[in-house]
Amino acid sequence: MYKIGLIVNPIAGMGGRVGLKGTDGWKILQKAKSLGAISLSPKRTTDALEPLLLIKDNLKLITCPGDMGENETISCGFSPDIINGIKSKETTFADTRKAARVIRDCGVDLLLFAGGDGTARDIFIAIGMTLPVIGIPTGVKIHSAVFASSPSKAGELSLLYLQKKISKLKEVEVMDINEQAFRNGIVKAMLFGYLKIPYKRRCLQAGKLGSSPSEEIIQQAIAEDIVENMNDDFLYIKGPGSTTRAIMEKLGLSCTLLGVDVVYKKEVIGLDLSESELLKLVNKKKAKLIITPIGGQGYIFGRGNQQLSPQVIRKVKRENIIIIATNNKIISLKGSPLLVDTGDLSLDKELNGYAQIVTNYHERTAYRIKF
Amino acid sequence: MKTKLRNYHAVRWDEPIIYQLNRSGERAILVPEVGEKITESVGDGISSIPESMRRKNVSQLPSLSQPQVLRHFLRLSQENLGADLNIDIGQGTCTMKYNPKINEQFANSEKVTEMHPYQDESTSQGLLEIMYKTEQLFKEISGLDRFSMHPGGGAHGIYTISSIIRAYHKSRGEEDTRNEIITTIFSHPADAAAPKVKGYKIIIIYPDENGFPDIEALKKVVSERTAALLITNPEDTGIYNSKIAEFTKIVHDFGGLCGYDQANANGLLGITRAKEANFDLSFFNLHKTFSSPHGCGGPASGVIGVTNKLSKFLPVPVVDYDKKNSQYFLDYDRPDSIGKVKDFYGVMPVILRAYAWIMSLGAEGLREVSNVAILNNNYTMKKILELRGVSMAFPEHKQRIEQVRYSWEKLTKETGIKTEDIQRRIFDFGTHYWTSHEPWLIPEPFTIEPSESYSKDDIDEFIAILGQIVKEAYEEPEKLKNAPYKSSIHHIDHDTLDDLLKWAITWRAYKKKYNGYFQHK
């Protein structure tokens, strides 16, 4: 018997059609409703569930009451198990987070969720990488690579995973943008964490993140290059991300995925350090900073790594900044330059120019940085 | 006149792999026992082979009867949509063209097939003459000073070029310090891969906003560490880099060499040359451009050319002519040579076909080839861009050389149909296009290259097929999602290629992985 969980964010996407660029927060939801917004999640969720009808008799579907899954699954012809403790109407992010934990604890093989970046963030906060997930894109903001390229692709991917026709899992970035800033025309996508998704070529959102199957191998190759060139006179400050983490794995060191860690003579001397802790270190010793662009927008500073403050960057010096990224990540930028937003305009200007990004073992890509 | 789409249907045999047809005890031929007198004279033929080289077990080749073997391969050939069978312009970057069959007959002549490379030179004057004269032709085509016919393919040519670059810098005492090769993201991937195998560090340059390799980036990365620039021109976008002489000057000013990847030469024959752009080295694919099929269609040849200052490093032997004795000969006396890069002297049938093709066309004919290839391409481009949902990379370049990289990005946004869906559907019309355009810098890419061989009717038919598929994409997208319907095989799941534990390119690997890996999963 296959076991799958489903969480539907019933309000995801409502803000988009009425020009509100998102539906985060009660006030915006009310405004969207007053502008006549209707929820796209139910229809999109049933589209995603349709491929699973093939295994209906062999599938245990666990979901939330009412609009958060029950209605969609029943209308599609399933007989779901409904979890307790979730309201059936007027639900909030807290319900999403709670539901994710409860469903995971039911021992499902996979969690399917319908929503946007905000929903992905809630799922990440609730269960992190403890369970494979697939996002059904119904929200306004889809910057995270956790979403399938369409609702039906989400269903197809789930079916293949349940049937063990694909077994490969991939860690992908959970991104979200600041909606308030977005409404003012500023896109600030931040890295919030990682989720694990079943991987099938071209079934996931293209362009948001390199999705090559060989991504991990390339990350290892990059790590090989970095380790080969390590100099014991320098501290190595490792920024967030799975690309930089590969270096720590190559060295056999523990590390944090989202934090800033420091290595000296191939030993960890600090994990998840704050700006002030970093400053103490770089004031004493020469340092090299290893960072990777975040998400599909190419920010190397100012999005999810604010510990790397202007003071830290200045102390390290531009020539000691090592940027690493797989070619797919560069390609996902679609020709846009790498971006910096350190909060210090004069530093941003200094960082402007060309960088040699380490894109593979003994391979560099000359690429523009702009602010 | 409106082009009528043909009612095509491929042959489908569902033919197993030949190993699966194995029937123990069946034989295609029974080899007679060796006669007593022969055994007495030369022994058993086995004991003279060193023990360590003798196999311990009998080979696991399949046992089949002759008619089974014949049926098997005929069935496979019928399922193959070969270059001579379809309007093969969808395989952009490969320069698919008609390769005259008379040249095939030359290559298959026993005057070629019965020759042995270790024959005495005096008995192989004909083939040596052809190699020598082919070299003279390529000297004229490129403007470079000497050629080697040795490399067995394009990537092999680049590898040989990399070896020569290394030998050159070594001769100047700079082997260790000049360890970087610069290339571009739209150059052929082998321009990065081959020198990397040679130990070089690679620096890749992206295009600027105009679609040219970013010259400012080149200025930033070039240095005393630069061993060479290896660059394709035109790149696979079909855009000719008109600033190419500036590129070579920038690299030369820092003491680096410049190597020209001329795998895309089909639109430049008799029009531009490596010499005038100040390249020091170059290679041409004799297959694809010069009368041997490309696309795994046959053996390849990636001949390389160099300027005088580098000629002493060419692989040994080179073919030379002794005027005094009117003899062609193999010159091994080259102390600075990089040595051997391949056994013998080159892939003779491919060299012969190239020689025959060039001689049949002459200088004017070669130029005509390129002119027609460019004309065909620009006609095709105009017609394709009239289709709904299509765009091309860097549209400000309105004139392209021999191919164009297009994008279905708009169509995908509007219909959800991707280039891979179109690739599957196009089989139903008796042709194909491929989507191997890694890295996918252009979203939902496809590359069309209508070389000089295709008529306006051929091109119109291909475009009409694309037009029909575009119509279906907007009106009945599900039809495309489930395609193909009339092909030899249905959709192949490429995901196994992503998993090192699953893909297998030999029967032995297949047995090992599928009898081991899957059964335990």
Image (cartoon, coloured by chain):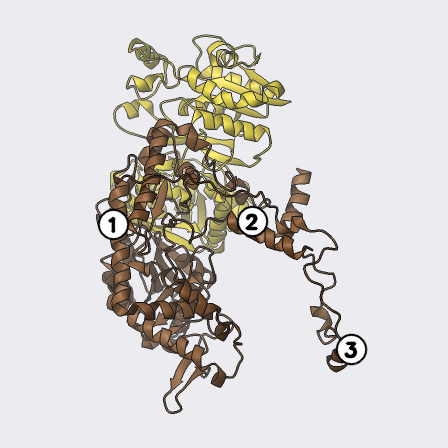
Chain colours: A yellow, B brown
Element type at marker 2?
helix
Asked if residue A292 can be seen in this view, the reply is: no
Mark number displayed over residue A185:
none
Which kind of residue does numbered mark 2 sit on? Arg
In the rendered image, which residue does mark 2 sit on? B75
Instruction: Give the CA distance from mark 2 to mark 3.
Output: 42 Å
Q: Which mark lies nearer to you, 1 or 3?
A: 3
Asked if residue B305 can be seen in this view, the reply is: yes
Element type at marker 1?
helix
Mark number displayed over residue B378:
1
Q: Is residue A352 above or below residue B143?
A: above
User: Is the C-beta separation of discs 1 and 2 under 8 Å?
Assistant: no
Q: Is residue A275 above or below residue A38?
A: below
Q: Is residue B34 left or right of residue B289?
A: right
Which kind of residue does numbered mark 1 sit on? Asn
x and y, in percent, of residue B415 in the image:
36, 29
Of the residues under marks 1 and 2, which one precedes in the sequence?
Answer: 2
x and y, in percent, of residue A13 in the image:
37, 19
Q: Is residue A190 left or right of residue B209?
A: right
Name the image quarter holding the C terminus of chain A.
top left
Q: Quadrant of residue B46?
A: bottom right
